[in-house]
Image (cartoon, rainbow, N blue to C red):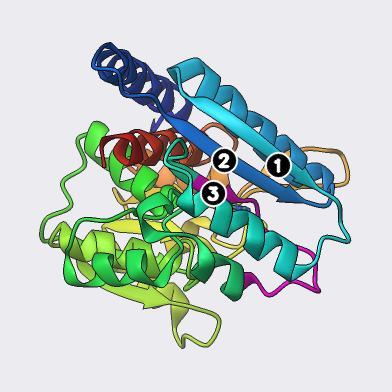
Amino acid sequence: MAKIIDGKKISAEIKEELKNEVAQLKAQGIEGTLAVIQVGNDPASSVYVNNKKKACAYIGINSESFELPEETTQEELLALIAKLNADDSINGILVQLPVPKHIDEKTIINAISPKKDVDGFHPESVGSLVIGQPGFVSCTPAGIIELLKRSNVTIDGKNCVIVGRSNIVGKPMALLMLRENATVTIAHSHTKNLKEICQNADILIIAIGKREFITGDYIKEGAVVIDVGIHRDENNKLAGDVKYDEAEKKASQITPVPGGVGPMTIAMLMNNCVKAMKK
Ligand code: GUN
């Protein structure tokens, strides 16, 4: 049976470390403030935004909330971002996604100063990651690296297969694993022989957004399995992209859903906020 990688416990450890770091920065007179912008009132977004604000309060940084109506124009949102970019009391700016359809997501991401881009979505942040320069890294993939390292998983020289190629998870994940000297394969919906490719993975990272798609036969005996998916069924039961009861019989270590990758995203957002305080 696989050992469980406990994301809840590891994220709590990280938040504790960050809390101490923030206390030390405060003792030097350095304050942190994260601006959190939500346009409209999508209930799922509201839950995420609240959890982010709670995490800020826990580690000791301020959060300033901007809850804008659904009808907010792109120009109004850009004006707010410009104001926050210029405000020295704001270290980090986060626009909760998705934004309403009449607003262009790329334009918004590009407008946030790379110095305050705690989500790591700005092209300059992504470019820095590609060429190994310091910069903000997207929170979910950064959290997965922390999960692996804190679970004593050797990455160097390992075959890592990432299923999914999104800008937020798959692509930055591949770059981070490459930085750790893994041999990286990115698979996706057009990949032929997906099962055979997955069977070759020492570390298998799944972010395809299909409930319980990865069954036990995709997994090599002893592989480390990281499940980024989260789905709720008609009975409100949560599951990931991996069929857990089959996978746990093959893997050496595995992340559960919930309580695996999920809690790490906010912990790494807080890590980016502390990084922003030091800039
Ligand atoms: N919506 C879903 N995930 C995220 C995230 O990590 N950051 C932001 N800003 N919006 C999101």
- Check contact, mark 2 vs mark 3: CB within 8 A: yes
| Quadrant in which the C terminus appears | top left
Residue at image x 60%, y 29%?
53
Tally of numbered discs: 3
Mark linked to residue 35: 2
Q: Earlier in the sequence, mark 2 or mark 1?
A: 2
Instruction: Measure the alpha-carbon separation of dots 2 and 1.
Output: 7 Å
Looking at the rendered image, the disc whose residue lies closer to the viewer, 2 or 3, is: 3
Q: Is residue 103 magenta?
A: yes
- Residue 109 image-quadrant placement: bottom right
Q: Amino acid at mark 2?
A: Ala
Residue at image x 23%, y 16%?
28
Q: Is residue 190 visible?
A: yes
Q: Is residue 113 magenta?
A: no
Q: Amino acid at mark 3?
A: Leu
Please report the bounds of the magenta region as a residue range: 93-105
Residue under numbered circle 1:
66
- Check contact, mark 2 vs mark 1: CB within 8 A: yes
Classed neighbour count for the residue bearing mark 1: other residues with Cα under 10 Å, few (<14), some (14–19), many (≥20):
few
Q: Is residue 20 left or right of residue 62?
A: left
Instruction: Measure the alpha-carbon separation of dots 2 and 3.
Output: 8 Å
Location of residue 163 with respect to 271 vertically, above or below: below
Residue at image x 39%, y 22%?
15
- Check contact, mark 3 vs mark 1: CB within 8 A: no
- Residue 272 image-quadrant placement: top left
Residue under numbered circle 3:
84
Q: Is residue 2 visible?
A: no
Location of residue 82 with respect to 244 vertically, above or below: below
Where is residue 74? Give x, y as percent.
Answer: 73, 69
Q: Amino acid at mark 1?
A: Phe
Q: Earlier in the sequence, mark 2 or mark 3?
A: 2
Q: What secondary structure is marked by label 1?
A: strand
